[in-house]
Image (tube, rainbow, N blue to C red):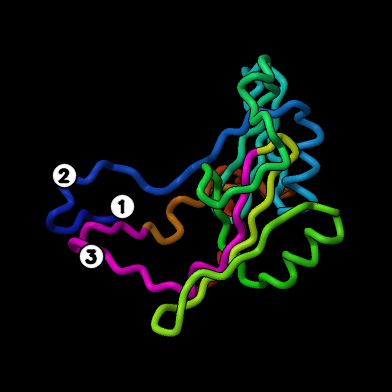
Amino acid sequence: MEKKKKGDESRPPLMALNHVSRLCKDVNKSLEFYTKVLGFVETERPASLDFNGAWLFNYGVGIHLVQAKDEDKLPSNTDHLDPMDNHISFQCEDMEALEKRLKEVNVKYIKRTVGDEKDAAIDQLFFNDPDGFMVEICNCENLELVPRDSADAIYLPGDRHAPPVAIPGSSNHADTRLPQTNS
């Protein structure tokens, strides 16, 4: 178990973002989008969940898709793209490859670069999922994270938030983890 650093007493005992939940008009259509376009992997859901949905995981975060009972809760304009609207963002190591993939599957997107000579440039792609929820893809690792207050307040969990993964054929499912890459 990791020891708390001095000054951690006031920090909530959080580890990392676990998942984002998305309402869907059609869970299967959204499932296909997140797996084929963004590379998420469908995982099993608890059997006690008696509603239509799907759980996905990759890149250290989950996406839970839930069949909407009321379509009024979904975005009304699925073609509207405004980077200032609510969105989820994924960091990308090859922006050109992702842009090519969006073109291949006919996903409408906007592209922009933020930054100038003194700042690191960040490339961004914005597009909507099948239900009109905006997604951003960026190379934000180009921008240095500079805390305004104390760097000690930032908690970097390492790989602690990676859940155990059951690998078919493994004798000890609960403790098996997929190989982790070292950065």
Q: Are marks 1 and 3 in contact (CB under 8 Å)?
A: no
Residue at image mark 2? 10
Region in magenta: 133-156
Q: Position of residue 181 (x, y in %)?
A: 56, 69
> In what element is the residue under mark 2?
helix
Q: Earlier in the sequence, mark 1 or mark 2?
A: 1
Q: Residues within 10 Å of mark 3 (few under 14, many from 20)?
A: few
User: In the shown orientation, is residue 37 left or right of residue 137?
Assistant: right
2 vs 3, front mark: 3
Q: Position of residue 115 (x, y in %)?
A: 47, 74
- Type of amino acid under label 2: Ser
Q: Earlier in the sequence, mark 1 or mark 3?
A: 1
Mark linked to residue 151 = 3
Tell me: residue 158, above or below residue 58.
below
User: In the shown orientation, is residue 134 left or right of residue 129?
Assistant: left
| Closest to the observer, 128 or 15 | 128
Q: Residues within 10 Å of mark 1 (few under 14, many from 20)?
A: few
> In what element is the residue under mark 1?
loop
Residue drawn at point x = 45 percent, y = 46 percent: 17
